[in-house]
Image (cartoon, rainbow, N blue to C red):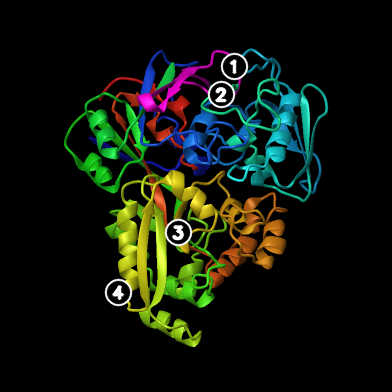
Amino acid sequence: MNRKTVVLPVLAGLLAPLLAACGDGSGSGGDDTVVVGTTDEFAVSKDNPAPFDPAASYDIAGWNIMRSTFQTLVRIPRSGTEPEADAAEKCGFTDSHNEQYRCTLKDGQHFSNGNQLDAEDVEFSMRRQLSINYVNGPASLFSNVDKVEAVDEKQVVFHLKKPDATFPLKLTTPAAAIVDSETYPKDGFVDGFSVTGSGPYVVDSFEPSEGKAVLSRNPDYDGGLNVRNKGIELRFFKSAKSMEQALTAGDIDVMNRTISPSQVDRLGTAKDEGVQLVEQPGQEIRYLVFDTDDRTAGRKAVRRAVAQVVDRQKLVRDAYSRTSEPLYSPVPSGLPGHNNAFFNEYGRPSPAAARATLEKAGIDTPVKLQLAYTTDHYGEATAEEFKILKKQLNDTGLFEVTTTGTKWKNFQPAALKGKYQVFGYGWFPDFPDADNYLAPFMEENNHLNSSYINREIRDKLIPQSRRQTERANASQQFGRAQDLVAEDVPILPLWQGKQYVAARDDITGVEWALNASSLNQFWELGRGVSD
C-alpha cells in the first residue's frame, strides 16, 4: 500500500502548481461511477427532520451531500481561500465598509427539475433561512444580514447590519445553498432525503436502510467545477472495520469517514498492493464544553483546574496514535491569527497548580464531574479518549470523574439543551478563517447554545476583526480573543485532527477529495490506471 502526505489544498495557494499534477484530470467528466464508503449515519428524526434541507442541516454528513447537489453563489477554490464564482458570474463588496455585497448571476442556469435559477431564488433562499431560523440549523451564520433583495433577474444585493469581511466565505457554505422558490416552502422543510438543486450531482436514490445511495452527474450543471466521474455510489457501513474490508476486497473505491487510528497505521504500512492512503493537515478540532450555569462546572476555578491537568500529548499518543496534534487554542494551527493561548496560560500539565487553584477558590476536593461523549459520531477512538481523560483527572485525587456515552441522535439534542455538565464536541469549520472558530461559540445564539458571555469578545473583538478585508490584519483581535477563552475556559481545546483518505490505487484525484472543512469533493474523483 502507498502512503502519501500532501499539503492541504485550500491552504496551499503558493504550492498549487506543485500539487496540480496530483490527480488533476481534464475534460468534462469521466465515464465511471466511483463507489465511496462511509460510516456516516443518515436518519430522519424529530431533531433532524430534513437532513439535506439547507435551512435544517448543520452537520458534516448532511453538508457532504448538499455541497455536491446544490450551488452557492461563490465557493472555496481548489487552492487558496479567496472565494470564486459558482452560480454567480461575479461578486463583491460595493462599499468601503464591507456592508453591501452584490452578485451577478450567470445566464441560463436551471435546477434539476428544469426550473430556471435566478436572483429571486437567491433572495428567497436567504430569506427562508433567516425566517425559519431552525434551532439546530445554520441560520446563525447569517444573523448579520439586514436585508437581501433581487435587483433584477440576474443581480442580488445583501445589506449587512455591520461590516463583515467574512461574508463572502459564509456564502460558500451549504447554509447559503440556492433552492428553488417554486419547490421549497418558505416556512417549512422538505422532509426526508429529497433534493432539488443545481449542483454538480443529482440524487437518483438515497436509501440508508438499504446501505446505498446513488448520485449521478448533473448534465445541466453550469458552475465552475470539473466533474471527473459519471456519478458517486455511496455505501453505508456500521463500522470502520467492515468498510476497510470492503476497500481491500475491491467492493468500494474510496473511504474516509471514519478511518480509525489503527487503520491509519495498518493501511499506511501494510505490504498489500492496491490501496493508497493520503494524509493531509486538517482543520477539525475536538474540545470539551462546560455548562457555565452548572453549580460545579460553572465555577471558573474548576474549569481552570481541569485545564491545568489535561495532558494533550499523552491523549493524542494513547487514544489517537498521533493521528492528531495537541491543540492549545480554539483556533487551529495553519490559520492566520492562531496562538497557543492555553499553553501560554497554563504551561505543562500540573496537578500541583490545579490543587492550588481549587484551594484558593475554597473548593473542596475531590470535585465530582460527569463527562459525556457520543459513541457513534466521531469514530471508534472517542471512548478511549474519554477513558484517558477520566484517568488523567482522577489520578490527581482532585477530581471524581464519571463518563457516559450516548448515541449521536440523542447526544446532540441533549448537549445543546444543557443536559450535561461537561461534554465532548467536534468542530469542522464552515470556512477557513479564525472567525469561524470563535464567533460560532461566543456570539449571541451561538452554536453550542452556551450561556457563557464575554462582552469584549462579542461586542469588540469580533466586530473589529470583521472590518479587516486582509484577514491577516485581524490577528491582534483573534489573539486577544483566544487569550480570554484560555482565561475563562468555557471550552477546553484538546486536539486538531489530520485528514486521511484511503482509496484503490486506480482512483485519481484522491489528494483533492477533501477540502479544509473535511467536506468531500466527490467531483475530483476519477478512475485511471492501477500502479
Q: Nearer the viewer, residue 184 or 21?
A: 184
Please say if the residues under marks 1 and 4 sit with CB atoms less than 8 Å apart.
no
User: Mark 4 or mark 2: which comes first in sequence?
Assistant: 2
Please say if the residues under marks 1 and 2 sit with CB atoms less than 8 Å apart.
yes
The residue beneath circle 2 is: 195
* Outermost residue toward the front in this view: 46
Crowd tier of the residue under label 2, counting other residues whose Cα lies within 10 Å: few below 14, some 14–19, many 20 or above? many
Residue at (40, 55) in percent of width and height:
373
Label 1 sits on a secondary structure element that is loop
Q: Which quadrant, please, contains the N terminus?
A: top left
Residue 395 bears which disc, if any?
4
The residue beneath circle 3 is: 423
Marks 1 and 2, how far apart in space?
9 Å
* Outermost residue toward the left in this view: 271
Marks 2 and 3, how far apart in space?
33 Å
Q: Above or below — where is 283 with respect to 19?
A: below
Q: Is residue 254 left or right of residue 141?
A: left
Crowd tier of the residue under label 4, counting other residues whose Cα lies within 10 Å: few below 14, some 14–19, many 20 or above? few
Marks 3 and 4, how far apart in space?
20 Å
Q: Amino acid at mark 3?
A: Phe
Please say if the residues under marks 4 and 2 sit with CB atoms less than 8 Å apart.
no
Q: Quadrant of residue 500?
A: top left
Residue 243 bears which disc, if any?
none
Q: Amino acid at mark 2?
A: Val
Please say if the residues under marks 1 and 3 sit with CB atoms less than 8 Å apart.
no
Q: What is the x, y in percent for residue 461?
A: 68, 62
The residue beneath circle 1 is: 112
Q: Is residue 447 left or right of residue 243?
A: right
Marks 1 and 3, how far apart in space?
41 Å
User: Mark 1 or mark 4: which comes first in sequence?
Assistant: 1
Label 3 sits on a secondary structure element that is strand
